[in-house]
Image (cartoon, grey):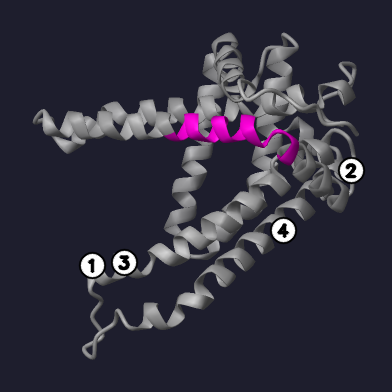
């Protein structure tokens, strides 16, 4: 399994290609963006267990996104019944479930390791009356958050290409994680530009939201306008996952593979 080494400009190229994929079939992908957004909202209604379940199914959701983009790139019209077709293969489903559990364990371990060095600082923010000082809380969680982000960069590299490698290439979990890490390391500069670009896009969306509220628009009206915009941005992000895979592992990609292999 060979991973291509791409120039830094590939990071922006992936975003452009994701946009082109979206334009070819915008409605199915926008539907997928709404569906995933609904799942995220539901997960937050169930404290702790909802978030754990969402983390566990993330590789499956990523794989379904990749399969949809693959169909669109091949000129196939995405119908509602096609979204879950890739999971009909028992072996693929089993590998993705194992991948999801591994992803959940890694995220939980990273969270635990990030918090442990700061336990004493976190406990000090609660006063004798059991009240929490919001300012002290904001200060105390900076360390754990930054530490977790460093851990999560490594986790993201391990699992970024893993859904495609396990679902399409039939790799074992350890192999998929290894090749995903190697591919991300070889293309660290394109991925850096890719991440910074998406960060700038999401930040611009936040600035736009602030501008709407500053103009005197009611929060309800602003939310009505911003919801489809946020779904659109998230959908474009999902669409850009496929170009990151195909441009890095394209030499190992067989065009005649069926989407559920």
Q: CA distance from mark 1 to mark 3?
A: 6 Å
Q: Earlier in the sequence, mark 1 or mark 2?
A: 1
Identify the residue shown where x is 53% and y is 35%: 195
The local secondary structure at tag 3 comes to: helix
Q: Nearer the viewer, mark 2 or mark 3?
A: 3
Crowd around label 2: few <14 · some 14–19 · many ≥20 (10 Å): some
Earlier in the chain: of badge 4 and badge 1, it is 4
Q: What is the CA distance from the residue labelled 2 to the residue labelled 3? A: 43 Å
Identify the magenta region: 185-199
Indicate which disc residue 101 carries.
Answer: 4
Residue 65, percent from left and from top:
65, 31
Viewed as shown, does residue 187 lie left or right of 223?
A: right
Q: Name the magenta segment's main secondary structure.
A: helix
Q: Which residue is mark 3?
A: 139
Distance (Cα) linking label 2 and label 4? 16 Å
How far is disc 4 from disc 3 in space, using C-alphas? 32 Å
Above or below, comparing residue 126 to residue 77 in the picture: below
Tell me the residue at 58%/52% (across/down).
54
Q: In which image quadrant can residue 2 be found?
A: top right
Tell me the quadrant of the picture where the C terminus can be found.
Answer: top right
What residue does disc 1 label? 135
Which element carries disc 2, helix, strand or loop? loop
Q: Which residue is mark 2?
A: 171
Give the mark, 2 or 3, whose residue is nearer the N terminus: 3
Q: Which tag is nearer the camera, tag 4 or tag 1?
A: 1
Q: Tell me residue 148's x, y (percent).
A: 53, 60
Residue 193 on the magenta span: yes
Give the mark nearer the N terminus: 4 vs 3.
Answer: 4
């Amino acid at each position: 399994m060979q991973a291509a080494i791409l120039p830094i400009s590939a990071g922006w190229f992936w975003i452009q290609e994701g946009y082109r994929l979206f334009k070819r079939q915008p409605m199915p992908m926008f539907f997928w963006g709404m569906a995933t957004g609904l799942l995220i909202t539901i997960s937050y209604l169930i404290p702790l267990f909802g978030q754990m379940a969402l983390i566990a199914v993330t590789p499956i959701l990523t794989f379904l996104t990749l399969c949809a983009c693959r169909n669109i790139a091949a000129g196939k019209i995405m119908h509602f019944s096609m979204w879950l077709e890739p999971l009909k293969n028992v072996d693929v489903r089993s590998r993705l479930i194992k991948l999801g559990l591994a992803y959940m364990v890694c995220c939980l371990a990273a969270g635990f390791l990030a918090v442990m060095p700061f336990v004493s600082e976190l406990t000090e923010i609660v006063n004798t009356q059991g009240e929490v000082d919001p300012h002290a809380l904001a200060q105390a969680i900076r360390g754990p958050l930054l530490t977790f982000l460093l851990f999560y960069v490594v986790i993201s590299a391990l699992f970024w290409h893993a859904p495609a490698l396990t679902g399409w290439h039939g790799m074992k979990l350890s192999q998929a994680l290894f090749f995903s890490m190697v591919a991300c390391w070889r293309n660290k500069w394109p991925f850096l530009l890719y991440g910074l670009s998406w960060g700038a896009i999401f930040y611009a969306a936040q600035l736009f939201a602030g501008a709407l509220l500053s103009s005197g628009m009611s929060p309800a009206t602003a939310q009505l306008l911003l919801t489809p915009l946020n779904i659109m941005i998230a959908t474009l992000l999902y669409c850009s996952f496929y170009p990151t895979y195909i441009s890095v592992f394209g030499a190992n990609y067989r065009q005649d593979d069926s989407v559920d292999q």
